Image (cartoon, helix red, strand yellow):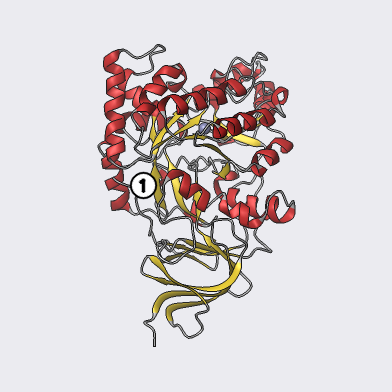
Amino acid sequence: MSAPYDVLLRGAEVYDGLGSPPVQADIAFAGDRIAALGSLDAARATLDIDATGLSVAPGFIDAHTHDDLAALNQPDMGFKLLGGVTTCVVGNCGFGAAPFKEAMQLFDGLTPGLSVPHYDGHAGYAATVETVRPGVNIAALAGHGTLRLAAMGTADRQPEERELQHMKDALGEALDAGVFGLSSGLIYVPGRYSQTSELIELASDMRDSGALYATHMRDEGDGLLASVAEAIDIGEQAQVPVQISHHKASGRANWGRVTESLKLIELAQARGLDVHCDQYPYTAGSTILVAIIENGAFTGSAQGGIGTVGADDVVIAGAPGHPQWEGRTVAALAAEFGIPARAAALRVVEHAPGTTAIIHMMSEDDVQQVLRHPSTMIGSDGIPTVGGRPHLRLYNSFARVLGHYSRDLGVLSMADAIYRMTGFTANKFGLNGRGRIEIGAFADAVVFDAETLIDQGTFENPNRYPAGIVDVFVNGVASVRAGVSQTARAGRMLRRPGT
Ligand SMILES: [Zn+2]
C-alpha cells in the first residue's frame, strides 16, 4: 500500500497551466509539492476531496500588483486568495518596497493607512514577508520611483553621477535580495522626470541576471507608440527582458491603436527581444487622482500619459476621510463646488491626499484585442485600498477573464486563458516550479466550477468576491475551502533563481 498523501483532489478536469487541453485526473499533494497525477483510486490522503465536475488549475499568478505593504498589513490576503490567486508580483509601476522611508512616502499616496514594521532594504522586506507569512506567495520587483526618490528626491532633472550610483547601489542590493526585476512608473513623480538613458543605465545592471524591466510607460494615450518604442529600446540597449504593464490605448482619440502597439511588440520579438505585456480585463482603469491631474487629463490638451479623458469619465474610488465623495464623478463634484473640473479635482486631492479614482478610458474592442494577443498575461493592477470603492479588478480579474471573456464570449480558450495567468507568467518572471500542474511542482492550485465561475460586483458596489472559486491551495496548504478563507497564511517570499 502506498504512503498516504496529505491532499487528494479526485476526478477533476485538470489544466496543466501550459496551455494543454484539460484531462480528467486525480492529483495528490505531499508536503508543499505535487506528488502524483493520474488515476489514484487506491491512494489515501489526510484531506480527500471529491472534485468531480470541477476543474483544477495551477494557482493564479497575478503578474501586476501593488500588494507590497498589504502583504504585511493585511496578511490574510483574502482579497486575492478568494479570487484564486496564489502568487502576487509586487513592486510595480515604479513603486517598490525599499528603501523603506521612500517606499512609505510613495505608498502613502497610493494606499494610505497601511502602516508596517520597519525593515532595511529589499533583504529586510523579504525577511519581513517571511516572518509575517502572508496568505499568498510574494515575488518582488524593485521600483525605479522609490530608488530615484531616495537618491535625489523629486528633482525634475537628470541624475548627477553620484545620484545615479546611489540608485545603482540600491538596485544591486535588491537584486542580491532576489527581486525579479526593476519596474518604472513614468507618469508618476518622480519616475516621470527620468529620461530613457537613465533607465537604460539602470536596466543594464540586470543584464544576464535573469531579472526583467517592467514598465508603466510614459504615455498610454496620444504618445502610446513612442512609449512602446521606448520600452523596447530600453530592453534592447540594456539586453534585458521587458514587460509592458497594463497594456492599453487610453482616451477615445487613441482607441484602436493597440493594433499598432502590439505590432511593435511582435517586431521586437522577431528581432529577438523577450518582450511581453500584461492586462487587466476592464475598460476602466484606476490610479491616484493626483497623477490624473498631473498628466493633464482635464485640460483638453493631453500632454500627459493617459490621453484626454472627460470629468464625466473619472469617478472617485477612495477619498480618505471624505467618503461622501466616493462613487461620484469629478464632473459632479465640479458642479457641486461651482468650479471647473481640474480645480475640483485639485480640491479633492488637497482635502484627501491619496485619493484614488476609476477612469473610464478604454474601448471594449481594444481590451479584447490585447487579451487575444499571444503576448498578453493577466495582472490585476488592483490597488488594495483600505475601505473606499476600489476598482473591481482587485478581486475579480482572473474570474472575469475565465468566466466572462473565455467561457461566455469565447475570446480565447479556457486552457489558453489559464496559461496566461499561470505557466506563461511563471516562465516570464522566472518563478521556478510555479504555474504548472506536474509532478514535483509546488502545490499551488485552484479548484473552480467552470460553469459558475464569474466576476461579481459593480463599480458602485465593488467589494465582492467572484463566484465559482471553490478551494485554493498554497504550497500544499488548504487556504480556501468551499469558498471560505481558512486564514492559513501559507505564502512564501519567492526569490529569483540563483539568489
Ligand atoms: Zn501602473
Q: Residues within 10 Å of mark 1 (few under 14, many from 20)?
A: many
Can you give x and y, in whole percent of width and height, for residue 119 in the image?
A: 26, 39
Compared across the picture, whether 352 is left or right of 368 comes to left
Residue drawn at x 72%, y 34% as measured from the top left: 363
Q: Quadrant of residue 238?
A: top left
Q: Residue 79: tell me if it is visible.
A: no
Looking at the image, which residue sits at the far front?
271
Can you give x and y, in whole percent of width and height, for residue 98 in the image?
A: 32, 34
| Residue situated in front as seen by the camera: 401 or 66 | 401
The quarter of the picture where the C terminus appears is top left
SS of the residue at dot 1?
helix
Q: Is residue 5 above or below residue 333?
A: below
Q: Is residue 53 above or below residue 265?
A: below
Q: Residue 388: tell me if it is visible.
A: yes
The quarter of the picture where the N terminus appears is bottom left
Q: Quadrant of residue 335?
A: top right
Q: Which residue type does callout 1 highlight?
A: Leu
Can you give x and y, in whole percent of width and height, for residue 342 in the image?
A: 61, 17
| Residue situated in front as seen by the camera: 236 or 469 | 236
Compared across the picture, whether 175 is left or right of 280 comes to left
The residue under label 1 is: 72
Residue drawn at x 42%, y 12% as measured from the top left: 156
Residue drawn at x 43%, y 41% as measured from the top left: 90
| Residue situated in front as seen by the camera: 491 or 199 | 199
Label 1, ligand 1: CB separation under 8 Å: no
| Residue situated in front as seen by the camera: 391 or 369 | 369
Q: Quadrant of residue 4?
A: bottom left
Compared across the picture, whether 156 is left or right of 59 comes to left
Can you give x and y, in whole percent of width and height, for residue 366 in the image?
A: 70, 35
Q: Is residue 477 above or below residue 103?
A: below
